[in-house]
Amino acid sequence: MTAPLERAWFARDAPVVAGELLGASVTTTSAAGRVTVRITEVEAYRGDADPGSHAYRGPTARNAAMFAEPGRLYVYRHLGLHICVNIVCEPAGVAAAVLLRAGEVTEGAALARERRQRAGVLRSDVDLARGPARLAVALGIDLTAGGLDVTDPDGRVVVQARPAGAAPAGATGPRVGVSGVGGDGDLFPWRAWLPAEPTVSAYRAAVRRRGPEHGRLAPGRRFGAPPASEGELRE
């Protein structure tokens, strides 16, 4: 396995890091085995200047990890149901992170498939890590991974650079399910993805802002409807 990206690499502006994570790999190692996902879709979030962020109103016990040193994991449960995996960016004390939204499993597909089938219906391998919750399940990441250092070569979760000379042309646009100003693609074009990749999740705008989940309401959700997961996460 190649050396992980260094902490200084993650200390840059979150939207820049997000774009350059496309084509990079995240690898998890456990007693069950190893799974590697090539990243095909991400979203950047910042602090008090980003109304779509958990940290928009400042530090709390819940979002404290977003203020940690760069290269640490910020892991949370979305809508009380799904695990979402973020990598902290920018200098320590500055709230910023990149959400890993989707990827292609390039190693350990059998283990990823087993994990996904235990968690719900798996229709095809394209869906193994298509959407942030599926990606977390495929990699075997749960809330206990919060705070882990992805720059540690011996760590449980490691992020490696994309191959030398491989700079895929990514697209950018509004973040999925972010409501209000934070969902404005002109002001915050902070979702980045590889357009030709079938593993990229579908874009859905927010219906109405509700709760602090990076400013999200599950796409397609209507007020008074029963809780639902994000469209690309539903099985």
Image (spheres, helix red, strand yellow):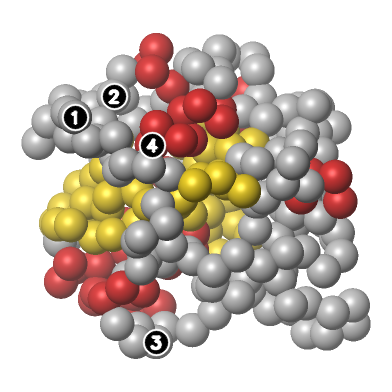
* Residue that carries the numbered disc 3 in the rendered image: 121
Image-based side of 189 in relation to 127, left or right: right
| Residue count near mark 1 (Cα–Cα under 10 Å), binned few <14, some 14–19, many ≥20 | few
* Tag shown at residue 119: none
Which of label 1 and label 4 is nearer to you? 1
The first of marks 4 and 2 along the sequence is 2
Distance between the Cα atoms at labels 1 and 3?
37 Å
- The amino acid beneath tag 4 is Leu
Which amino acid type corresponds to the residue marked 3 in the rendered image? Val
x then y, percent, for residue 147? 47, 33
Q: Residue at x 74, y 77 (%)?
A: 220
Q: Amino acid at mark 2?
A: Leu
Considering only vertical position in the picture, is 122 above or below 25? below
Q: Of helix, strand and loop, which one carries label 1?
A: loop
Give how far apart the Cα atoms at labels 2 and 1 are. 16 Å
Q: Position of residue 77 (x, y in %)?
A: 60, 57
Mark 2 lies on residue: 5
Q: In which quadrant of the rendered view does residue 62 lie?
A: top right
Q: Nearer the viewer, mark 2 or mark 1?
A: 1
Residue topped by disc 1: 165
Can the viewer see residue 92 in this picture? yes
**In terms of sequence position, does the residue under pointer 1 or pointer 3 come before the other?**
3
Mark before the other along the chain sequence, 1 or 4: 4
Q: Callout 1, which amino acid?
A: Gly
Q: Which mark is residue 21?
A: 4
3 or 2: mark nearer the eye: 2
